[in-house]
Amino acid sequence: MADSLRTFETDRERMNARVLEVENLGIKRFLALDSRAYEAGALDARTKELLGLATSMALRCDDCITHHLIRAAEEGASDAEILEAVNVALIVGGSIVIPHLRRAVARLEEIRETEAGERV
């Protein structure tokens, strides 16, 4: 995994663990609900990650976008599927989403380069 992606994932895991140490039942329940929402059910996990990506793009959360890009790739989403989800976000969110679209495309390139490097 590329350094910036590894750093993102390491920091995310470290801080999630730290947040879970806080004695707040509401926070713990919300984080558990968030994790469970992306498990396969009537929709498969890949589709749910694409939904999470589109929603995160429309809400303009770069950390969420990166997380859902990584997870969508891990679930086997193709570039075409990811870009269709991004297009939905652009339509829903409007031109304010364009900077996030640029960063998402750069992150996707980074993810694919990392995958290619791991296969060699």
Image: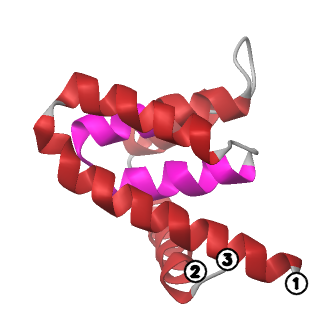
Which residue position is annotated with label 3? 114
Amino acid tagged 3:
Thr
Q: Residue lying farthest top?
A: 42
Q: Residues within 10 Å of mark 3 (few under 14, many from 20)?
A: some
What is the number of the mark on residue 6?
2
| Percent position of residue 75, x then y | 74, 44
Which residue position is annotated with label 1? 120
Residue 3 can be seen, yes or no? yes
State how far apart marks 1 and 2 are (Cα). Answer: 18 Å
Magenta range: 53-74
State how far apart marks 3 and 2 are (Cα). Answer: 10 Å
Q: Label 3's element?
A: helix
Amino acid tagged 2:
Arg
Q: Is residue 98 left or right of residue 6?
A: left
Question: Which residue is at the front of the view, 105 or 29?
Answer: 105
Tell me what residue is drawn at x 32 percent, y 31 percent.
89
In which quadrant of the rendered image does the N terminus lie?
A: bottom right
Q: Residues within 10 Å of mark 2 (few under 14, many from 20)?
A: few
Q: Are marks 1 and 2 in contact (CB under 8 Å)?
A: no
Q: Residue lying farthest front?
A: 80
Amino acid tagged 1:
Val
Tell me what residue is drawn at x 37 percent, y 32 percent.
87
